[in-house]
Image (cartoon, grey):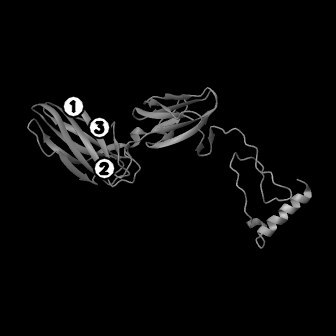
Amino acid sequence: MNRNEKESEVYQEFLRYKGLPADLWPRFVYEGIPTPAVRRDIDHPARPQPQPRADLPPHLGDAIFLSKAFASYPVTVTTIPTLIIKSTYTHPYMILNPSRSLGLASIVTGFSGIVSASGNSQHIPIGVASFEEAHVHLTIHSFTGTGSYEIIAQTFDSVTATWKDSQVIFSGINLAYTSPLYAYIGRLGVATDLAFRWSLLGAATMNFTLAVVLKGGTGIGSLGFANSVFLGGPGVTTQAGFPLLPGSRQSFVIEENVELWGIADTDTTIRVFVL
């Protein structure tokens, strides 16, 4: 196309949008990889020219380009630094800390097992910061002995990092105990994290389960800090690591020969996606 033909095309565009300023003329949108500079037609600077299309990278912004089956593999992160990824070449990865307890209501196991002495469930706390109230269901699978148990709800004091008793929810649990098997603790003690302790009077062995129903949630989740994973290098700690909270994900482009490690307060299984 010679210069006269270009001038004629510009004139035809002018007639078509007569009365509109040039900056309001329609512009053609081209999708592709952004480049440092956009080439423009010398005679029609308002119209960008299409760029040569390059091969798409595996990761571009928030969009993920899939060139193979989208699959993942599990990694159980423990209470000591655990190797999650050892990248043999620069490549993007997505790490997901799955949560099955998201929603406005959530059912969580407060404790399940056999006890024959006083104890607590502080090692598996329930995150209740995003919930307003709680209901507790007690199921006694078996009971032997002449003693009795008392079950107390506990709330976590984040300032002193200690647990405080909030209320007795079940008392006098013995061989003949049948009720109550349900307790509504409401908002009492439902602060940031919830746990339970049991006190034994005498000698007895009990196999029981505490099921907790959390209500009035915001959809954030109920796994608490115990299921958070902290990412970093081989010396990562729960105080200095990058936090990956339950129900969240994070994408990384990991360079060649770089390792990603993780640590958690309790054993937590995450999913690693190779993008």
Of badges 2 and 1, the one in the foreground is: 2
Q: Secondary structure at mark 1?
A: strand
Q: Is residue 125 above or below residue 37?
A: above
Q: Secondary structure at mark 2?
A: strand
Q: Which residue is mark 2?
A: 214
Sequence-first tag of 2 and 1: 1
Q: Residue at x 77, y 54 (%)?
A: 48
Q: Residue at x 21, y 31 (%)?
A: 115
> Gap in Å between the C-alphas at discs 2 and 1?
25 Å
Label 2 environment density (alpha carbons within 10 Å; few <14, some 14–19, many ≥20) = many
Q: Amino acid at mark 3?
A: Ser
Q: Amino acid at mark 2?
A: Leu
Quadrant showing the C terminus: top right
Sequence-first tag of 2 and 3: 3
Q: Residue at x 87, y 58 (%)?
A: 6
Percent x, y for residue 210? 24, 40
> Gap in Å between the C-alphas at discs 2 and 3?
17 Å
Q: Which residue is mark 1?
A: 115
